[in-house]
Every structure is written in structure tokens, then in C-alpha cells.
Amino acid sequence: MTSPNSSMQHPMSWQVSADGGHLIGHMILKKTPSRDVSPSGYSSAAILGLKVVGGRVLESGRRAAIVEKVKKGSTADVEGQLRPGDEVIEWNGRSLQGKSFEEVYDIIAESRQEPQVELIVSRTLGNVGPGLSDRREGRGAVRIVDQ
């Protein structure tokens, strides 16, 4: 159960999309710094606990950034309630829809020193499995984020 203070630290909301087929989540996830924070900001050990696949071609033919893995007990799991198969629509206000792997990689990399990340994600209603049915990865598109 999430405490009121925890909710204040990690604002989050989920709403059903206009077409009723998806849940749209909006969240701010604060990175948990490791003990050895560099002078320039959070070290790469700051944990959100996400693995994102950028430039993934969906059945519809469009490219998307998909959550591939969520580390159990991480900020993304506990506070963000993210699941494998969720589509990351925006990362810190920048759209990831239609972007190549390289473009998604660059957008995510730009936030490495930021103490928090704002995400907008989409989850297909009925996505109860541990990910997408088609688990093939295109062009080495796996990107590990702060893990």
C-alpha cells in the first residue's frame, strides 16, 4: 500500500482513453540516488528500474517505445505501477511516438542527470501478460534505463 507521503513524492494518475481501449498514465518518478552521487548529479546507479525498447515496430506499423522489463520493487514498479508492454508516449515532455531507436536513446540519455522523470504511458486494456505477444527485438533496440 502506498502512503500519502509517497503519493505526494511520486504524483501519478491513470485514466481510460477516449476510445476505451487503453489506460493512459501520467506520472513523475523521482530517481533514487545511490550512495556515490557524482558532483554533476545523480550517478548511473540512480534507479528507476526500467528497460525500454525504442524504435519498436508495432502491428499497426508505427514505431513506439515499449517497456520491456520492470525491476520488482523499483520506483517504476511500486510508484509508477508500470508493466512490460506499456508504451511510453512521452519522456519529460518529449514525444517518443514514431521515433527511431537512436532518437529514443538520445531523449532518454538527456535525462540522466535529472532527479526525476515525467512519463506519459499507454497500456492496452486486457494486457495482463508479462509483455507483448511478439517479443522479437528489432535492430538491437533494447535500451536499459538507469538500472
Image: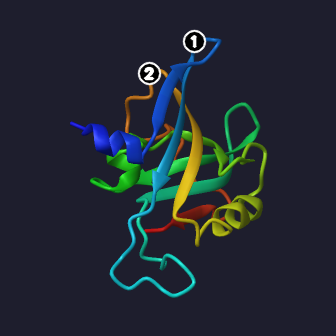
> Is 72 on the left or on the right of 111, as rendered?
left
Number of numbered discs on residues: 2
- Residue closest to the far left: 1
Disc 2: which residue:
126
The span from disc 2 to disc 1 (Cα, nearest Å) is 11 Å
User: What residue lies at 56% left-to-right and 22% top-to-bottom?
Assistant: 22
Q: Give above or below for 121 relative to 14.
A: below
Q: Residue 47 location in percent, x, y? A: 41, 65
Q: Nearer the N terminus, badge 2 or badge 1?
A: 1
Residue at image x 36%, y 45%? 79
In the rendered view, tell whether residue 124 sits above or below residue 72.
above
Q: Is residue 78 left or right of residue 90?
A: left
Residue 131: mark in rendering: none
- Residue at x 21% of width, y 36% of height: 1
Residue 20 is tagged as 1
The amino acid type of the residue labelled 2 equals Gly
SS label for mark 2: loop
Q: Position of residue 128 (x, y in %)?
A: 38, 29
Query: Viewed as shown, does residue 50 lie left or right of 108?
Result: left
Pointer 2 local density, CA inside 10 Å: few below 14, some 14–19, many at least 20 = few
Element at badge 1? loop
Evaluate if marks 2 and 1 touch, with contact meaning CB atoms under 8 Å apart.
Answer: no
